[in-house]
Amino acid sequence: MVEIKQEDGRKGKFDIFVDKNLAGTMTYTWAGEAKFIIDHTQVLEGYEGQGLGKKLVQAGIEFARTKNVKIMPLCPYAKRVFDKDPSLKELLF
């Protein structure tokens, strides 16, 4: 079972768990009230190749849509996700 938990604040994060074990994290930092920066995405050793990094970025995308804010993907992995999906351009800052 895969579960994602969020901790929001000036610096926030999304943690992804597989069978209740931490499998990865995506961190972000708020840059004002209207945007946040995805600064790091990491999938822990042993959990690679399962699409968990993309699920973390998707959780950030859903959060941005809910809050009606923009995203600046400075993390190279998150930037690739945005570059591959033109429908996400509306969220870019």
Image (spheres, helix red, strand yellow):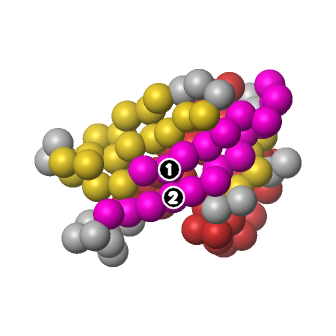
* Position of 49 relative to 70 (above/below): below
Label 1 Cα neighbours within 10 Å, binned few <14 / some 14-19 / many ≥20: many
Identify the residue at image location x=76%, y=51%: 72
Q: What type is the residue that disc 2 sits on?
A: Thr
Rounded to the nearest angstrom, the CA distance separating label 1 from label 2 is 4 Å
Image location (x, y in percent) of residue 55: 44, 54
* Position of 45 relative to 58 (above/below): below
Q: Is residue 67 left or right of residue 72?
A: left
Provide the residue designation for mark 2.
41
Image location (x, y in percent) of residue 11: 60, 34
**Residues at badges 1 and 2 in contact (C-beta under 8 Å)?**
yes
| Magenta range | 25-44
Q: What type is the residue that disc 1 sits on?
A: Met
Q: Secondary structure at mark 1?
A: strand
Residue 63 placement: quadrant: top right
Provide the residue designation for mark 1.
26
